[in-house]
Amino acid sequence: MPSYLLMCFVAATRLNNSTHAVIATLVEAPQEAQLLRYRWARLWPLGVLPATVFALTNNVDWPILSFDPASNQFIISLANVFSQLFLWCIVGLVLFFSFHEGLVSNSLAKNVRVDLCQLDSLNGFGRAGLNSFLMLAGAPALTTLQSIDQDFSFDNYANALVVAIPAALIL
């Protein structure tokens, strides 16, 4: 899942760069459009903080972990905590920047002139939404593949829903 989300994050960033370049040509002040895009990006810890709290409270089974350095479970316990933090921080970053790009696209759309005879110039907005949708649809599909070897219970899909429902609302 982390590798899929990192791939989606990199692909979304590349696609959003080209999409914003197209949209900036439609806006009256392209420099302000670029400044608007990066204004709130420095607040990325706001996406990581709730993800870290969620990882530590809901996804780490503290009673079974052993943090005694003499224990043979010490390395496994550290790896478990680190992997959950890593996974959910990536989820938090992807959700934060998806939400951020949606807000920027929304504010740019308010400043774009619409010519009903040439609607092809608005394709960038549709492309951005479609890319976000495909990323959102892929995460629960990948979660299903990951849990095929286990029994089909709600616990296997709960984390996917925690990611998919806010992402769907953002989209």
Image: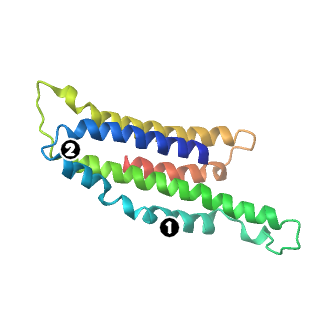
- Judge whether 145 appears above or below 67 on screen: above
- Mark 2, other Cα within 10 Å: few <14 / some 14–19 / many ≥20: some
Give percent across and percent down for residue 23. 23, 38
- Residue 49, disc: 1
Is residue 63 positioned above or below 127 on the image? Answer: below
**Location of residue 88 in the rendering, given as x and y in whole percent from the top left corner:** 57, 58
Q: Name which residue lies at 53% across and 62% down.
A: 51
Query: In which quarter of the view is residue 82 placed?
Result: bottom right
Q: Which amino acid does label 1 sit on?
A: Leu
Q: Residue 73 carries which label?
A: none
Q: What residue is at 74 percent from the left and 65 percent from the top? A: 78
Whether residue 86 can be seen here: yes
**In which image quadrant can residue 4 be found?**
top right
Mark 2 residue type: Ala
Q: Residues within 10 Å of mark 1 (few under 14, many from 20)?
A: some
Locate residue 156 relative to residue 65 in the image: left or right.
left
Colour approach in the figure: rainbow
Instruction: Report whether 165 appears left or right of 143.
Output: left
Q: Residue at x 48, y 55 (%)?
A: 93
Numbered tag placed on residue 109 in the rendering: 2
Q: Which residue lies furthest to the top in this view?
A: 117
The picture places residue 99, in percent across and down from the top left corner, at 37, 53
Residue at 12%, 35% in the rendered image? 114
Mark 2 to mark 1 CA distance (whole Å): 30 Å
**In the rendered view, does 102 fall on the left or right side of 155?**
left
